Image: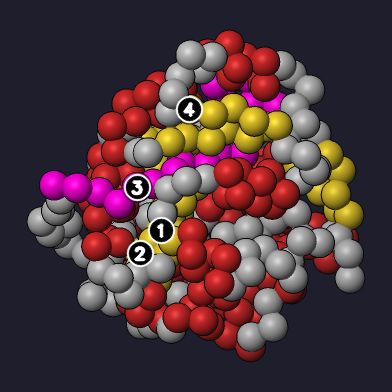
């Protein structure tokens, strides 16, 4: 596997018969996203044995709307989670799943018909226990969406590299599949229930520990792309990133700790270069050289990824993101230290 983002997608296999699979989606207050979600589900039913939509105590009519939509469906089950929280909802759905493979995504996501089929193809290899793929925000206007697109691209680059070197670090439950037998073998989310996030990375880590690095796979191709609704405000985006970043403290490995700290360290370096603007002409030229190198490196990497996934590249957005991102990361770090954020209309306080 290439250590950088692949230039070519290669041949995508389409087997005659797929392993029986259950798509699981946990929902909470997602009424506004149901039309696009329902469309994605319907166009991929031919590749699935069943779909289980599990409601996590929604307060906006999500459960009722889903029941009405799939009342006569033999393939789509709408159930209510008996306990509170996303992990509890997913656990309940998996206990009901009849598929050998469990696919997971989020209610604010959309995908092409190819997604389940191409993901499931990897499980023809009996050694593979978990497969994940890329996620990007849906195309929307405005700088905030463009900022999120660039940030997601940087995450995809790190994810692909970590899998390529046999040190897979991260994945997202919004685009993930695993053998149900492997989930039970590693005792699912047991040991991480206290953390409201991390249903993906903790599972990845447990499966790697049980089955080895070759048991997990990343598919960075357009056919497996999941698109999610971008956050609509800076406040919501920062709360989202605090929730995601906060789970890193629960990882016990030194490598995870370093990966969590290095991005923040780089942002401090970029920000510290601002003092060079006031030291003199030579230092000013040094400042310009540092930032030109930074932006050029991002252009080379980001253009390749975006084009391979069918997304547009906008230079002004990249340049704006490049300058704003260091300040944004520092705000997220401060939020993680504080440990309090809002998610799904629930205020969560970090437990130490």
Mark 1 is surrounded, within 10 Å at the Cα level, by few (under 14), some (14 to 19) or many (20 or more) other residues, namely: many
Q: Earlier in the sequence, mark 2 or mark 3?
A: 3
Which of marks 3 and 4 precedes in the sequence?
Answer: 3
Q: Measured from the top left, where is residue 336 in percent x and y?
A: 78, 62
Q: Are marks 4 and 3 in contact (CB under 8 Å)?
A: no
Q: Which residue is mark 1?
A: 132
What quarter of the picture does the C terminus occupy? bottom right
Quarter in which the N terminus is drawn:
bottom left
Q: Residue at x 19, y 47 (%)?
A: 17
Q: Position of residue 186 (x, y in %)?
A: 59, 73
* 228 vs 310, nearest the viewer: 228
Asked whether the residues under the numbered discs 1 and 2 touch, taking CB atoms below 8 Å apart as contact, a structural biologist would say: yes
Compared with residue 347, is residue 169 higher up or lower down, i.e. above or below? below
Would residue 88 be visible to someone looking at this image?
A: yes
Label 4 – label 2 distance at C-alpha: 27 Å
Q: Earlier in the sequence, mark 4 or mark 2?
A: 4
Q: Is residue 37 left or right of residue 126?
A: right
**Residue placed under numbered mark 2 in the picture:** 218
| Residue under numbered circle 3 | 20
Q: Quadrant of residue 252?
A: bottom right
Residue at 88%, 64% (x, y): give it: 351
Q: Residue at x 23, y 74 (%)?
A: 2
Q: In what element is the residue under mark 3?
A: loop
Q: Residue at x 66, y 46 (%)?
A: 92
Residue 297 appears left or right of 255: left
In 3D space, how far apart are the residues under numbered discs 3 and 1 (Cα atoms)?
A: 18 Å
The residue singled out by tag 4 in the image is 76
Residues rendered magenta in the picture: 16-34
Rendered location of residue 174, percent (x, y): 51, 47
The Cα–Cα distance between marks 4 and 1, rounded to whole angstroms, is: 23 Å
Image quadrant in which you'd find residue 93: top right
């Amino acid at each position: 596997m290439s250590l950088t983002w692949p230039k070519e997608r290669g041949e995508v296999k389409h087997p005659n018969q797929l392993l029986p699979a259950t798509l699981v989606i946990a929902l909470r207050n997602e009424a506004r996203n149901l039309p696009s979600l329902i469309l994605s589900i319907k166009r991929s039913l031919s590749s699935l044995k069943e779909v289980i939509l599990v409601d996590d105590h929604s307060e906006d009519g999500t459960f009722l709307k889903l029941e009405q939509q799939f009342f006569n469906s033999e393939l789509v089950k709408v159930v209510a989670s008996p306990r509170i929280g996303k992990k509890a909802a997913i656990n309940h759905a998996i206990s009901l799943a009849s598929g050998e493979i469990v696919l997971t995504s989020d209610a604010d996501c959309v995908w092409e018909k190819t997604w389940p089929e191409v993901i499931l193809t990897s499980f023809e290899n009996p050694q593979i226990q978990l497969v994940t793929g890329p996620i990007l925000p849906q195309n929307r206007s405005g700088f905030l969406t463009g900022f999120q697109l660039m940030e997601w691209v940087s995450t995809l680059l790190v994810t692909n590299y970590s899998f390529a070197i046999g040190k897979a670090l991260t994945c997202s439950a919004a685009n993930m599949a695993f053998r149900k037998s492997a989930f039970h073998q590693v005792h699912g989310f047991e040991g991480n229930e206290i953390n409201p996030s991390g249903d993906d990375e903790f599972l990845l880590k447990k499966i790697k520990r049980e089955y080895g690095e070759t048991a997990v796979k990343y598919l960075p191709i357009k056919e497996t792309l999941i698109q999610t609704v971008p956050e609509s405000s800076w406040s919501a985006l920062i709360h989202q990133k605090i929730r995601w970043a906060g789970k890193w403290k629960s990882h016990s490995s030194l490598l995870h700790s370093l990966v969590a700290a290095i991005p923040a360290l780089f942002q401090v370096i970029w920000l510290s270069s601002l003092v060079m603007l006031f030291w003199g002409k030579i230092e000013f030229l040094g400042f310009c050289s540092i930032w030109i190198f930074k932006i050029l490196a991002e252009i080379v990497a980001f253009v390749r990824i975006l084009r391979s996934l069918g997304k547009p590249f906008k230079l002004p957005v990249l340049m704006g993101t490049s300058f704003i991102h260091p300040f944004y990361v520092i705000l997220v770090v401060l939020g993680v230290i504080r440990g309090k954020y809002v998610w799904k209309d629930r205020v969560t306080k970090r437990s130490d």
